[in-house]
Amino acid sequence: MRFLLDANAVLKRYVSEPGSVIVTKVFGAADSGQASLVYSLWTLGECLGVLDRLDRQGRLPARGLAEASRALLGETTRLTRLDVLIVVPLGVKLIRRAWDLLLKYHLYQADAIQVASALERRVDILLTTDAQVALAARGEGLRVLDPEQDEAEIAKALRLRSGSHPRRAVHGRRTRD
C-alpha cells in the first residue's frame, strides 16, 4: 500500500494531536516494509515552517522545535535509505501539473503540489485533513482518507486492527508502543 501524506498528516508524526496515533501506525507499517510512503520535497519545508510557527507561539515544549525538526529530517533520511519513502522532487513537469490543478480546483500552490505528487507517484491513498485537497484529489480519482476521522479505514488499509500496536521508529530507534 502506497500512501501520500501531505504536510498536516506528516506533522501528526512529530506533534501529538488528533490523528497522531494512526499516522504513527502508517509510519510503523512503512518501517516494517508493510507500506510505502510518499511526500513532496515541498512538504518538508511546509512541516519545518509549521514547527517554527508552533514554537514561536509557545505551543511546543522547550527544545521542541530542534527535536521535532531533527526527528522529521532524520526519519525522512532513514526511511528514504530503507527505500520505503519517496520524496518527490519539484521538477518542471510536476509544477506544471500542479498549476493545472491549482486553476481547476482553486487550490493554493502547496496543495496543488500535494495532489500532483500523488498522481505522479500513483499512490493508493492520500492522507490529509484538508477539505480542499481532499476534494481536488477525489476529483482526480484518488482515494483520500482523513487521519482524524478515518482511523478504522486507514487501519484496514494497513491490515491492522485499530487496537494493534506495530513496531515503530522514534528518533531513529526501533521501539515498541
Image (cartoon, rainbow, N blue to C red):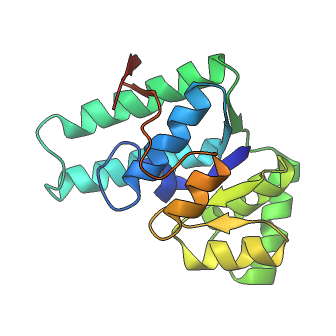
Using the rendered image of the protein, determine whether residue 90 is visible from the camera's viewpoint. yes
Q: Residue at x 79, y 68 (%)?
A: 99
Q: Quadrant of residue 127?
A: bottom right
In the image shown, does 6 or 163 lie closer to the viewer?
A: 163
Residue 70 horizontal side relative to residue 98, left or right: left
Q: Position of residue 147 (x, y in %)?
A: 50, 61
- Is 106 located above or below residue 68 in the figure? below
Q: Residue at x 54, y 29 (%)?
A: 76
- Is 76 located above or below residue 49 in the figure? above
- Which quadrant of the figure contains the N terminus? top right
Residue 112 horizontal side relative to residue 104, left or right: left
Residue 135 horizontal side relative to residue 28, left or right: right
| Residue furthest right in the image | 93
Q: Residue at x 45, y 27 (%)?
A: 167
In the image shown, does 174 or 165 lie closer to the viewer?
A: 165
Q: Position of residue 118 (x, y in %)?
A: 76, 54
In the image shown, does 87 or 156 lie closer to the viewer?
A: 156
Q: Position of residue 19 (x, y in %)?
A: 41, 59
- Which quadrant of the figure contains the C terminus? top left
Q: Position of residue 152 (x, y in %)?
A: 53, 61
What count of labels does the image hold? Answer: 0
Q: Residue at x 64, y 16 (%)?
A: 81
Using the rendered image of the protein, determine whether residue 107 is visible from the camera's viewpoint. no
